[in-house]
């Protein structure tokens, strides 16, 4: 880390050219950020919280630079969004060109190539080599809502199955699909109907094999809902907000097979796991699962708001003309950014980079787990790793320790995120543009955090 008294060079341009260093010149948050925070308090609804209130001036590579001149190491990617790096060159260039050409026409009124190009690319990169089509939206929640609409029309059935610990969004239908009450649902009901929850495979907590956990979930769906009523089973192949829960091997294929055998659509919500985060294009690829429908967002467009539903052509085409859309869905600038992000992924082999980052994080975390019995499990895949903290020798969640270590990391200039139904999971989602040196330095800080909060 660099510490300096010199005033920071004022910069507004981010991207990989930013000095790749952790540099603290004030306490966190610094005086300028604190002033801005007071202004936020005055004008922004309290319901919109902020976890680490440093106001950002620029970001790129593996760092976020704040208005006080602090440079923080980013282990969150804005919740798995800036996988190709913040202000990635191809994203910036293509979005700028598109901005100068036209900003919006509404694809439903007068179409443009970018939208079609993104859909064609999605058909190429998503699992399975069957004919596929896509529709574009603005946010992950909107994509999930539309996937359910499509599944209902295609099957003529109403019911939707989701899992314990699931996260699918904050709109009315997706709140119903999301598992955790606080902060996502409390007081916001009544929720949409015909959503049923099945037990998830959670190896640390249930000790079941993938096949056993699938049999348990299928039994619930079969007996409590009835396969014939189900339009789709929606599942995150690795759960995100719910705690980076990696189902036991065999769970996903068994659930997918049951779906196929019963005319139920298998909907993979890859909003957090998609676009190389896990070291494959999609987490479903890892076990060779081919979803009927797949929702994507976050990592698709390098930080611009874009989301998609991609599915078997005949399922996607079940909806009547005009039944899918929205004013901004597939905005031309967001589509240009997506094409830029895809270019970054291919040029820099970010799938391979995600695997290398994953291996590096795993070795840091395994070493940490050896000396800190509060770490009940190290899990994840690729550049999506987590540790679950529990009272040693038990599976009793220790959210307080997770919060304490996270607060320490923030104070030392490392952006870390927590998650999990009990808030006791530390998750690591660095941009795939981060250097090994920064990664090692960040995990050194995480280790210090465990040492000083012991
Ligand atoms: N499905 C699997 O991870 C978004 C939520 C952050 P939107 N996860 C981050 C928060 O607290 O709001 C997410 C996800 C999965 C759906 C969504 C929803 O995506 O773009 O936030 O609507």
Image: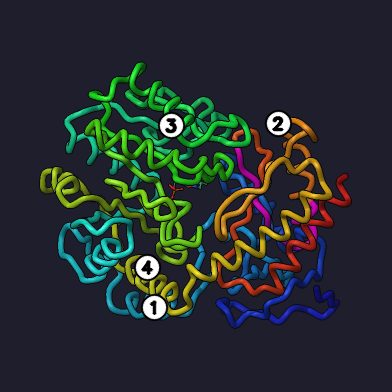
Label 1, secondary structure: give it.
helix
Q: Do the residues labelled 3 and 2 touch (CB within 8 Å)?
A: no
For discs 3 and 2, the disc positioned in front in the rendered view: 3
Q: Do the residues labelled 4 and 1 touch (CB within 8 Å)?
A: no
Q: Are marks 4 and 3 in contact (CB under 8 Å)?
A: no
Percent of width and height locating residue 405:
78, 48
For discs 4 and 3, the disc positioned in front in the rendered view: 3
Assign the N terminus to one quadrant of the image.
bottom right
Residue visible at 66% across and 65% down?
Answer: 360
Q: In which quarter of the image is residue 299?
A: bottom left
User: Would residue 323 appear left or right of 367 to someone viewing this image?
Assistant: left
Q: Quadrant of residue 366?
A: bottom right
| Magenta residues, start to end | 408-420
Q: Which mark is residue 214?
A: 3
Give the residue pinned by disc 1: 96
Label 4, residues with CA under 10 Å away: few <14, some 14-19, many ≥20:
many
């Amino acid at each position: 880390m660099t510490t300096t008294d010199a005033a920071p060079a004022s910069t507004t341009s981010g991207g990989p050219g930013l000095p790749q260093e952790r540099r603290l010149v004030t306490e966190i948050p610094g005086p300028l950020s604190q002033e801005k925070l007071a202004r936020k308090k005055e004008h922004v609804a309290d319901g919109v919280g902020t976890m680490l209130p440093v106001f950002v001036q620029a970001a790129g590579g593996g760092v976020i630079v704040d208005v006080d001149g602090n440079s923080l190491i980013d282990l969150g990617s804005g919740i798995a969004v800036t996988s190709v790096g913040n202000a990635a060159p191809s994203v910036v260039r293509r979005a700028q060109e598109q901005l100068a050409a036209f900003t919006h026409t509404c694809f439903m009124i007068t179409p443009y190539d970018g939208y079609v190009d993104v859909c064609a690319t999605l058909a190429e990169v998503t699992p399975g080599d069957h004919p596929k089509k896509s529709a574009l939206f603005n946010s992950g929640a909107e994509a999930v809502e539309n996937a359910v609409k499509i599944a209902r029309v295609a099957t003529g059935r109403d019911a939707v199955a989701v899992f314990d610990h699931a996260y699918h969004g904050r709109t009315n239908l997706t709140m119903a699909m999301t598992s955790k009450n606080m902060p996502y649902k409390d007081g916001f009901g009544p929720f949409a109907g015909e959503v049923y929850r099945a037990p998830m495979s959670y190896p640390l907590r249930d000790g079941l094999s993938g096949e056993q956990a699938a049999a348990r979930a299928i039994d619930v769906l079969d007996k409590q809902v009835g396969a014939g009523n189900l339009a789709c089973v929606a599942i995150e192949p690795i759960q995100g907000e719910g705690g980076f829960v990696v189902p036991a091997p065999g769970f996903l294929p068994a659930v997918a097979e049951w779906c196929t055998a019963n005319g139920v659509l298998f909907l993979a919500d890859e909003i957090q796991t998609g676009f190389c985060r896990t070291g494959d294009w999609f987490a479903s690829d890892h076990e060779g699962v081919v979803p009927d429908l797949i929702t994507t967002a976050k990592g698709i467009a390098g930080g611009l708001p874009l989301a998609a539903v991609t599915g078997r052509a005949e399922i996607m085409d079940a909806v009547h003309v005009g039944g899918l859309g929205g004013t901004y869905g597939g905005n031309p600038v967001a589509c240009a950014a997506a094409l830029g992000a895809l270019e970054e992924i291919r040029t820099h082999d970010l799938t391979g980079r995600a695997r290398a980052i994953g291996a590096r994080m795993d070795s840091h975390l395994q070493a940490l787990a050896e000396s800190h019995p509060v770490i009940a499990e190290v899990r994840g895949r690729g550049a999506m790793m987590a540790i679950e903290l529990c009272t040693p020798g038990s599976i009793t969640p220790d959210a307080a320790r997770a919060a304490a270590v996270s607060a320490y990391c923030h104070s030392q200039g490392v952006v870390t995120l927590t998650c999990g139904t009990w808030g006791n999971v530390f998750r690591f989602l660095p941009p795939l543009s981060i250097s090994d040196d920064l990664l090692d330095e960040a995990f050194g800080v995480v280790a210090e955090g465990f040492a000083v909060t012991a």
